[in-house]
């Protein structure tokens, strides 16, 4: 089962109580959406979590998200200054954080495992990303618009 958030933001009142999503959660092209604060209790997505092309989003904070069973993709959110996932420990697939023009902070202090590739690039304001606990990944790369470097897990 997939959940595509393509509805009027005013009917999302039930989302603060959602803790688990069986399948994919895709939030794409929501031009009026400013925050994902309504996912404050979300702990697990068994499929992919995609947050893409949401022009007005200025906050992605999911304080209880612990695991993503597929890929975690955060791309092309023009005004997003920070990505805060303090309890995220595992991503079974790829971790992709690309082309978020205003992204200045990525907070993933508990992330220990990424099953696929880790690609964090073309976020103009982030020269280097630290993921202190990450020990396993297929490949890891980070870059900005002017430099490219390999990130080493700490």
Image: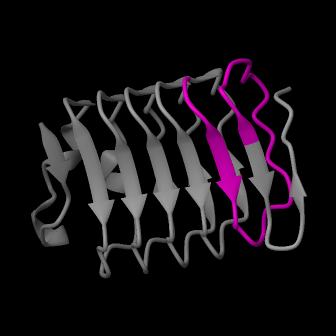
Q: Nearer the viewer, residue 121 or 100?
A: 121
Quick check: 105 left or right of 46?
Answer: right
Q: Quadrant of residue 124?
A: bottom right
Query: Percent from the top left, x then y, of residue 61?
Result: 49, 50
Is residue 37 visible in this depiction of the protein?
yes
Q: How is the image coloured?
A: one colour
Q: Residue furthest front?
A: 138
Q: Residue at x 20, y 59 (%)?
A: 5
Quick check: 117 left or right of 35?
Answer: right
Numbered disc total: 0
Is residue 61 visible in this depiction of the protein?
no
Q: Residue at x 80, y 58 (%)?
A: 143
Query: Percent from the top left, x then y, of residue 76?
Result: 51, 71
- The image shows residue 85, relative to residue 9, as above or below, that is above
Q: Quadrant of residue 68?
A: top left
77 in magenta: no
Q: Is most of the magenta stretch helix, strand or loop?
A: loop
Query: Which quarter shows the C terminus?
Result: top right
Quick check: 84 left or right of 41?
Answer: right
139 in magenta: yes
- The image shows residue 20, relative to residue 150, as above or below, that is above
- The image shows residue 145, relative to residue 63, as above or below, that is below
Q: Quadrant of residue 122?
A: bottom right
Query: Percent from the top left, x then y, of residue 147?
Result: 90, 65
The residue segment tinted magenta is 115-140
Query: Percent from the top left, x then y, of residue 38?
Result: 30, 52
Query: Which quarter shows the N terminus?
Result: top left
Quick check: 29 left or right of 62?
Answer: left
Q: Residue at x 56, y 69 (%)?
A: 80
Q: Residue at x 51, y 63 (%)?
A: 75
């Amino acid at each position: 089962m997939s959940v595509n958030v393509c509805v009027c933001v005013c009917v999302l009142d039930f989302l603060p109580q959602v803790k688990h999503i069986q399948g994919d959660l895709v939030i794409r092209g929501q031009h009026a959406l400013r925050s994902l604060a309504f996912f404050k209790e979300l702990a697990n997505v068994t499929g992919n979590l995609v947050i893409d092309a949401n022009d007005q989003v200025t906050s992605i904070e999911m304080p209880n998200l612990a695991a993503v069973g597929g890929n975690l993709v955060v791309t092309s959110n023009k005004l997003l200054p920070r990505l805060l996932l303090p309890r995220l420990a595992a991503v079974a697939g790829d971790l992709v954080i690309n082309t978020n023009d205003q992204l200045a902070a990525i907070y993933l202090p508990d992330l220990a495992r990424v099953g696929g590739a880790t690609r964090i690039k073309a976020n103009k304001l982030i020269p280097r990303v630290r993921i202190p606990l990450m020990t396993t990944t297929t490949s890891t790369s980070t870059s900005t618009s002017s430099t490219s470097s390999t990130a080493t897990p700490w």
